[in-house]
Image (cartoon, helix red, strand yellow):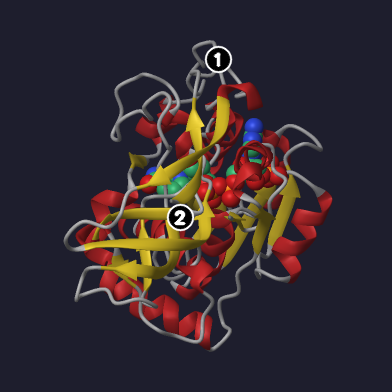
Amino acid sequence: MTTSTQVHLVRRPTGTPRTEDFATVAVDLPGLGRDEVRVRNAYVSVDPYMRGRMNDSKSYIPPFGLREAMTGGAVGRVVESSSAALPVGTAVLHSYGWRNLAQGPATHFSPLPETDLPLSVFLGAAGMTGLTAYAGLKRVAGLREGDVAFISGAAGAVGSIAGQIARKLGASRVIGSAGSAAKVALLKERYGFDEAFNYKDAPVREQLRGVTPDGIDVYFDNVGGDHLEAALDRLNTGGRAALCGAISQYNSTERTPGPDNMGNLVTRSLKLEGFIVGQHQDLQPEFARQMTAWLSDGSVVFDETVVDGVENAVGAFLDMMNGANTGKMLVRP
Ligand code: NAP
């Protein structure tokens, strides 16, 4: 019998998840049925949205079930197949993450193009997080030539790509925030941000004011809370904010108060729009073409923080929520 080593959620976390909320389990896999594949995962993704799925609450995506394998983005190669469409060796993208071996109907696995790029990039810069950055800036915020853009969570998977896409779309200045001096240096030296600050050094409101003498036109929000409030103070008339995430609040056990300066929406005709990347799948072909070209010619760079061992996936998730990652956090199971 072949076994798959998988991570199960065994208890719904309150506040910050603990390792005891999860279990690593070896599960026997049945033989393949008709039109099925077995895939050895090369990389599995750990993402902030998964924190929401650990709660038993209504959202745009159902909660994880208890005592069953969690799901999430993964890439790998087919190692056994009863499907003519996906022969052994095919590289695939799918949602049976949090495990080393995945198995299911071939229709649940999407073949990936054979490129010179590493497979992992289809979970990050050329995958879901890259598309999030692209859709958020291009469509939701409608970034235009000459705009000043501020991006929070700027050294992470979405943020590091968003900073570079903002420049590609014609931003005149790109400003970022992140949680350490090393990340701030990286934003300026590697990802091409004009200005960056460590949000832990002083209140975000003060720091953002200091680096935006002409205000901002676009805010790409990964963080919420103090960052959103600071951006609302600095958005120019007609400014647009793409609300992508609010990671500062995902482990909160109390209700979080809203920004204290919503009046600015009226006086400066601001537009705030939340979005989920899945609503913008129609941009995928255009995004894939653009991003593959940018990554191939080196004009967009990406980083990954890789943790080995499926049994360490929970640790990787918790570390990512705490900022241990630069760029995309991945597990090599
Ligand atoms: P990520 O940025 O690679 O990793 C999370 C980062 O959040 C950490 O590295 C940490 O970096 C930062 N962080 C943690 N607590 C924070 C706090 N209290 N204040 C400020 N920063 C904090 O993750 P990602 O996958 O790219 O996701 C980024 C955001 O986009 C998340 O809010 C996520 O939910 C959202 N997202 C939304 C969509 C969508 O469809 N709307 C899709 C993908 C992702 P520091 O060291 O800088 O603190």
Residue that numbered label 1 is attached to: 14
* Residue 285: % across, % down: 27, 73
Left or right: 227 as drawn, with respect to 287: right
> Extreme left residue here?
34
Residue at left 21%, top 56%?
33
User: Closer to the camera, 184 or 307?
Assistant: 307
User: Closer to the camera, 73 or 161?
Assistant: 73
Residue at left 54%, top 19%?
13
User: Closer to the camera, 213 or 324?
Assistant: 324
Q: Secondary structure at mark 2?
A: strand
Residue that numbered label 2 is attached to: 101
> Quick one: quadrant of the C terminus?
bottom right
Marking on residue 237: none
Residue at left 47%, top 73%?
170
Tell me the crowding category of disc 1: few under 14, some 14 to 19, or many 20 or more residues within 10 angstroms, Cα based. few
Gap between marks 2 and 1 measured at Cα: 30 Å
Which amino acid type is shown beneath numbered disc 2?
Answer: Leu
The reply to whether residue 197 is visible in this rendering is yes
Residue at left 55%, top 69%?
164
* Residue 36: % across, % down: 24, 60
Which amino acid type is shown beneath numbered disc 1?
Answer: Thr
Above-or-below relation of 67 to 91: above
- Quarter of the image where ligand 1 sits: top right
* Residue 243: % across, % down: 42, 41
Q: Secondary structure at mark 1?
A: loop
Q: Quadrant of residue 226?
A: top right
* Residue 184: % across, % down: 76, 55
Task: Say which of marks 2 and 1 sits in front.
Answer: 2
Q: Quadrant of residue 127?
A: bottom left
Left or right: 143 as drawn, with respect to 45: left
